[in-house]
Image (cartoon, rainbow, N blue to C red):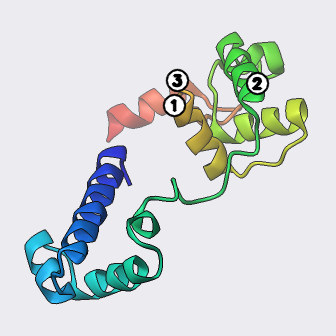
Amino acid sequence: MTAVGRVRRESVRMQAAELFERGVKPPEVARRLRVSPKSAYRWHRLWQEGGALALASRGPSGSRCRLSSRCLEKLAAYLEEGPAAHGWVEDQVWTAARVATLIGRKFHVSYSVSGATRLMRRLGFSPQVPARRVAERDEQAVTVWRESQ
């Protein structure tokens, strides 16, 4: 969910709390705020138990980043140095798999390829997909074959 979506959802819950305080029933809150009745009833129950604070956001969901802010800065610096500086000399491409390996080597933290992708995007990098070429590829034979087609 985007930050704008989180802010809108938070705003709607706070509007619901205000309506509940004025005695508006959940079905009417649902209609006015264009939310499902199920959400309005859930918010009403939370509001009854803990007031408006119970409807406040608890922050983003999901697991926390396993790297500290200092480690993230170091990782960004490593990525800026390029793959060759860290042992990948075949090409100058940061793949998510390479970044996951780099994180494991430098910080002793295990990241999945998809987790490394999300982390790269968070740092402003995009994972690249290297061109896969067979080592024994005969470019001349490929050209001849393409022209004959």
Left or right: 13 as drawn, with respect to 130:
left
Q: Earlier in the sequence, mark 3 or mark 1?
A: 1
Q: Are marks 2 and 1 in contact (CB under 8 Å)?
A: no
Q: Tell me the element at label 1.
A: loop
Camera-near label (2 vs 1) is 2
Q: CA distance from mark 2 to mark 3?
A: 50 Å
Q: Which mark is residue 70?
A: 2
Q: Which residue is mark 1?
A: 126
- Give the residue pinned by disc 3: 140
Q: Is residue 31 above or below residue 62?
A: below
Q: Quadrant of the N terminus?
A: bottom left
Q: Which one is earlier in the sequence, the residue at label 2 or at label 1?
A: 2
Categorize mark 3 by other alpha carbons within 10 Å: few (<14), some (14-19), many (20+): few
What residue is rendered at 66% in x and 36% in y? 134
| Residue 9 quadrant | bottom left
Can you say whether 100 is above or below 28 in the image? Answer: above
Which label sits in the foreground, 3 or 1? Answer: 1
In this view, the residue in front, 110 or 15, is: 15
Q: Are marks 2 and 3 in contact (CB under 8 Å)?
A: no
Check the image and report above or below for 46 versus 138.
below
- Cα–Cα gap, marks 3 and 1: 33 Å
Q: Amino acid at mark 2?
A: Arg
* Residue 13 locus on image (x, y percent): 30, 65
